Image: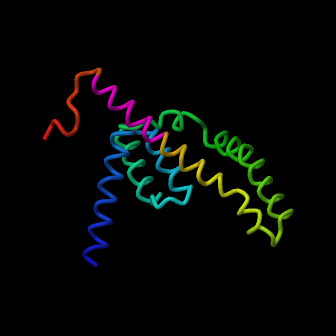
Amino acid sequence: MVVLASISESLVNETSHLVRTGGLPMIFVLMAVGSACIPVPSEVVMLFAGFAVADHTASGSTVKRMPIVRFTVLTTIGSLPWVLGLALAGHAVGGDWTSVRKGFEYVDYAVVALVVIGIVYLLLRRRRGRADSGDPAPDAAA
């Protein structure tokens, strides 16, 4: 039980650090990683994302300015093609979905590669920004 608690604590600490330093782009990356079935718990990510927006360390101003009715209507309209497409594809494939799934395994690898490339890009951009501004690297502060 102690091992599980230490894993959970380190996961929460690392996720909190990533959200705090990476802001909204990192929240997007972490949520995409979690959606790709890579074990990043969205509950932890969204908890710290909410803290960041409430603390004004991440901007939620665009969401705050949009009326809720307009947001709901646009979100519904935007999601309809996706949901309809998935429903029609599921109906067409029927019980043969496992054979179709095997044909798309390369997509899993492409998604993982894109996520890794995105994380590396964000980290390099952040590091380059610190070097340009003269801020010490995180390791140099210790």
* Front-lying residue, 97 or 70: 97
Secondary structure that dominates the magenta span: helix
Relative to 102, residue 47 above or below:
above
Image quarter of residue 72: top right
Question: Is residue 34 depicted above or below 133 in this figure?
Answer: below
**Is 81 part of what is drawn in magenta?**
no
Q: Which residue is pictured at 80% across the width and 63% down the height?
A: 90
Look at 33% across and 43% down and name the residue there: 20
Residue at point 42%, 48% (across, down): 49
Q: How is the image coloured?
A: rainbow
Is 112 situated left or right of 50 in this image? right
Q: Residue furthest left?
A: 142
Residue 78: quarter of image: top right
Q: Position of residue 117 (x, y in %)?
A: 49, 40
Front-most of residues 81 and 120 = 120
Q: How many marks?
A: 0
Q: Residue at point 41% right, 58% down?
A: 44
Q: Which residues are magenta?
A: 118-131
